[in-house]
Amino acid sequence: MHVLSTFGKSSTVTAAPKDTCAVVAYGVAEYDRAALPGLRKQVGPAGGPPLTPSFVRHQDDQTIVGLAAIFAAISAAGLDPKVLHSWGVVATPRFLGRPLMATALPKFIAEGAWSVSPHTIPYLSLHSIAGAISQALHIHGPNFGAGGGPDGEIEALLAGMAMLSAYSLPGVWVVLIGWEPELVPNATDDESSPFICRAIALALKPSGTGGGDLQLSIEPAAHATPRPRAAAPTLPSSRMQVLAAILHDRHYAAAHWPLPGGGLLAWRRGTEGREG
Amino acid sequence: MIRQGKKRRPAEPGHDPEVWITGVGAATPLGNSYAAIADNLLAGRSGIRAVSNFDVNSHPSKIAGWIEPAPTPPGCDADAFARLDSRQKLTLWCCVTALRDAGWWERRTEVRVGLVLGAGAEWLLGWEEDGLKGGTNVMDPEKDTASIVQVMQRELLISGPVLTVSAACASGNYALAQAKRWLELGWVDVCLAGAGDLGVTPMSLAAFGNLRALSRRNEQPQAASRPFDRDRDGFVVGEGGAMFVLEAAETASRRGAHAYAAIAGCGASSDAHHMVIPSPDPEPASAAMRQALSYARLDPADIDYVNAHATSTPVGDAGEARVLHAVFGEAIKDIPVSSTKSMTGHLLTAAAAVEALACLTAIERQAVPPTINLDNPDPACDLCHVPHHARPHRVRAAVSNSFGFGGSNTCLVLKAV
């Protein structure tokens, strides 16, 4: 459940954010199934060589799209990759491994133990994408997977925000990935709603360290009251689409996701009531 | 039973508020309660046996530290419990028994209780369990409605945020570090943290076996997990879980709670080297250990016990020995080091959590658990070993290392309170 708000001049947001961090860079990657083999061959830093075939060969599609999003973020913000080496990484895929498991299970039932790929656990566990990102970017700070199922995006944002201060990090990548709609193995694409693998990579830094149009904060209670200014475009339906909308589209200034006992607020800096 | 500890003075003003462990719930190959597990660890018993709950004829490794299904926790409805899947049952058992142990079960709705759970392959294992019974959940996303943490939120009636974390073998240490930070940030009043894994499944055992990571000492299950031994040939998969109740020292002290230990420091780093093989460079793992010690405000020589990650693999155990030498220097000759995986097997995502429990045992019982099967220590693992039998030892501060697949290095420092 989310609240997407278009703020007018007299914002009704009144509560001071308790814990805030800034999104200093972001990247969005969206690929349909037909485009993924091509992406797999070329994913890599902008202007640099693609990641090696041996590295990408066994990675899941969600990992590849997540990497594309993070490289896009680095390029768009002009970040120096070397300063990222001490950052942390949190990655949340959604239902990672479904397509492979859909073929591996009947194969195991028919053929037995030898048929199970040794790559299943290293590449399809919840930790796998964060580990792959740390390798691809030579990041030596902490890395772990978060969420992995419904509500994974919220879990990952919470985890990333806490990770920043838990290890006194200069920054944390939070990478959200998933198929929208959720991939049904063996299903053909519906032209009106094709399966899209979407990833958003957010570079979080402690608030006040400079930069960052978008802020994230944990609120002790739900304070934001939406007040649409005008007829808004079609509201996005998923959390990732909501975040992408706030990042890209000035019609949207904030989103609020309830948490037990409070909420997670994503808001554009400069919105009245949110200065500084 | 609610244990009343002595009222203890919380941390002095100006210092970081301390976070204490006040409750433990667990299910492991060595037992389903903290007391039973502690007894068996110090007795040097092995929980590893031949796998007999599914067909392993075509599996390279046929042994594991497997557990029986978790029993219905006290106070929970048996019929409702029976409807949960095996991972949910394990987690609920650990959470309920931890909350009861801490004295928070009856009062859990009065405070914001959060949950941070280490879980690595929740959906893969769920699809496997369902598929082997003839189900089709893997093909139908609409059937995947709730994660384990969401089910726990509902079953436990807890009102704080919940989070699944995964860093392979290091998951439990990350869970404890996240929970500690949530308490410091004021996001929760009490936090359940730990990890669980039921990785002894037909496909999981096959996958690890095909990775050539497992011991094939099938004729001698209890001798197969041999960390630091010259004749080690791979790890033995184990399963189970451990959950802890964390709260601010001030809260615990005010209500007279028993404290197992303080979480004094958490350090973490990444190898950024390989999806499976640990880095030959000891520096990233050393950095994690140094960070944990720094946060704990301890020197290496202040440590009384190291619970090593050491899984019984030829490469990993020697690599960790190099890390310990790099961090502790000469002091490592006198600091007892043991790997309790020799008795439990490698509990995968749950390893760090169960090994934190082993450190609590050392602190509480003032004795270091042994590394069993350590008949011929590998010269490349030149450490102050504790072979075969527990050693009475003054333990005020203990370190638990956990280094996961994907190069996640974590270190936890626990201190007596």
Image: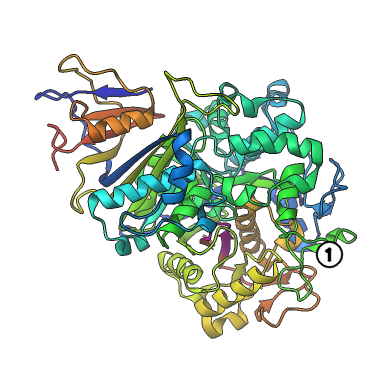
Q: Amino acid at mark 1?
A: Ala
- The answer to if B3 sits in the magenta stretch is no
Q: Chain of mark 1?
A: B
Residue B302 x, y percent position in the rendering: 51, 74
Image: B159 above or below A162: above
Query: In the figure, residue B136 lies in which quadrant?
Result: top right
Write down the quadrant of residue B308 in the picture.
bottom right
Vertical placement of B271 versus B203: above or below?
Answer: below
Look at 68% across and 63% down and name the residue there: B311
Q: Position of residue B275 (x, y in %)?
A: 56, 58
Name the residue rendered at 59%, 59% in the picture: B276
Colour setting: rainbow
Q: Relative to A133, say whether B187 is above or below.
A: above
Using a 10 Å C-alpha cutoff, classify the residue at mark 1 as few (fewer than 14 neighbours), some (14 to 19) or many (20 or more).
Answer: some
Q: Which residues are magenta?
A: B400-408
Which quadrant does the N terminus of chain B fall into?
top right
Q: Residue reaching furthest left?
A: A9
Label 1: which secondary element: helix
Foreground of the two, B415 or A232 = A232
**Res B52 → quadrant:** top right
Does residue B24 appear anywhere in the picture? Answer: no
Q: Position of residue A51 (x, y in %)?
A: 44, 56
Query: Looking at the image, which is closer to me, A67 or A252?
Result: A67
Q: Is residue A4 visible?
A: yes
**Front one among A15 and B22:** A15
Residue closest to the far top: A231
Residue at 70 percent across and 83 percent down: it is: B379
Give the main secondary structure of the magenta stretch: strand
Q: Which residue is mark 1?
A: B223
Looking at the image, residue B254 sits to the left or right of residue B36; the answer is: left
